[in-house]
Amino acid sequence: MNLLKLDLHLHLHHRRRRRNELKLRPQSRFLYFPSRQQIHKLSPSFATPLYTLTKYDRVSKLNAATPFSIVNNEEKEIEEFEEYLAEDGEVYQKTLRLVECAMFAAVSGLAFLLSNSLAIEKYFACFFALPIVMSTMRWGVAAGRKTMVATTVLLFVLSGPVKAITYLLLHGLLGFAMGTFWRSKTSWSASVFFCSVVRATGALANVVIASYLIGENILALITINVHALVTYILSSIGIIAVPSMNFIYFIFGFLLLLNCGLFVFLLHLLYAVFFTRLGMKTSLRLPKWLEAAI
């Protein structure tokens, strides 16, 4: 019995001593990687496997981190692509501007062509410049210029150069000028005056081109008729005088500007009401009397 107790005490003492030795011993790792200096001191047969083990450990760490980096990059690219094609993105806005300019050009060109073909141009002439003005107001001066050029090219292809030039001089330049002045928030007095000058210049250029095409001086015929009318009015009043040609040219220019000014003023009123109904009143600079009336 005493021997069993002694044996048990020795066994317990041996286990406690071994446990204390384990606590005092530094914790060892599964693999021991010496420093570079120790690797150089080791023999080549032992240093090479250690170097391959350290290299394999680095490569495994890189391979473990690579999938996460690829996933993050793909998510960033998807987010950037979605932002790129969003409604307020650059690509969406450019595409929408291109589509609207093309639609405005097609509508304007086809309306002018059908009006000329059906001889109802006088009734719809006030709407030919509207697509260019709308394109300029929505997307800027460059978009209005592109719409004007696209409409002219479309009419050139469909009906020839004469109608294309007629549209450009009488309606295209007027719509572009009006849209530019409205886009820059110019006052109505300046806009009506300069647009009237643009319309009158385009009308004169159209008459000159028509005179060249038919081989007849239409301006001379107009001035002769104006001279005869003024002479008749003066003689009916009791004034016997022959007006000079400079006076006739002045009267002709004044009447032309008056006609174009009335037409442009009516266009300003019509387009202002139209844009107000479309909800674009904030982008317009209207006179106080018209703003109060609308």
Image (tube, helix red, strand yellow):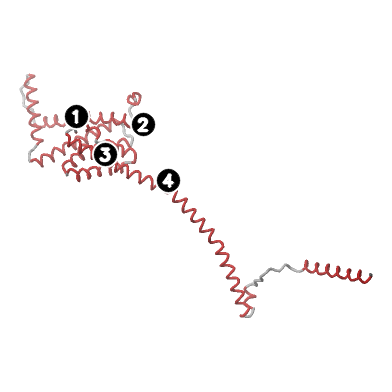
- Mark 4–mark 1 Cα distance, whole angstroms, equals 48 Å
Q: Residue at x 32, y 44 (%)?
A: 99
Q: Secondary structure at mark 1?
A: helix
Amino acid type for the residue under numbered disc 3: Val
Q: Earlier in the sequence, mark 2 or mark 4?
A: 4
In this image, 43 relative to 107: left or right?
right
Q: Residues within 10 Å of mark 1 (few under 14, many from 20)?
A: some
Q: Are marks 2 and 1 in contact (CB under 8 Å)?
A: no
The residue indicated by pointer 1 is: 259
Amino acid type for the residue under numbered disc 2: Lys
Q: Earlier in the sequence, mark 3 or mark 1?
A: 3
Q: Earlier in the sequence, mark 4 or mark 1?
A: 4
Residue at the far front in the pictured view: 1
- Mark 3–mark 1 Cα distance, whole angstroms, equals 27 Å
Q: Secondary structure at mark 2?
A: helix
Q: Secondary structure at mark 4?
A: loop
The residue indicated by pointer 2 is: 281
The image shows a total of numbered marks equal to 4
Name which quarter of the figure residue 148 lies in.
top left
Q: Are marks 4 and 3 in contact (CB under 8 Å)?
A: no
**In the image, which is nearer the foreground, mark 2 or mark 4?**
4
- Mark 2–mark 3 Cα distance, whole angstroms, equals 24 Å
Q: Earlier in the sequence, mark 2 or mark 3?
A: 3
**In the image, which is nearer the foreground, mark 2 or mark 3?**
3
- Mark 4–mark 3 Cα distance, whole angstroms, equals 28 Å
In the image, is residue 271 above or below residue 91? above
Coordinates of residue 215 in the picture (x, y in percent) = 7, 41
- Mark 2–mark 4 Cα distance, whole angstroms, equals 27 Å
Q: Are marks 2 and 4 in contact (CB under 8 Å)?
A: no
The residue indicated by pointer 4 is: 86
Q: Residue at x 60, y 70 (%)?
A: 54
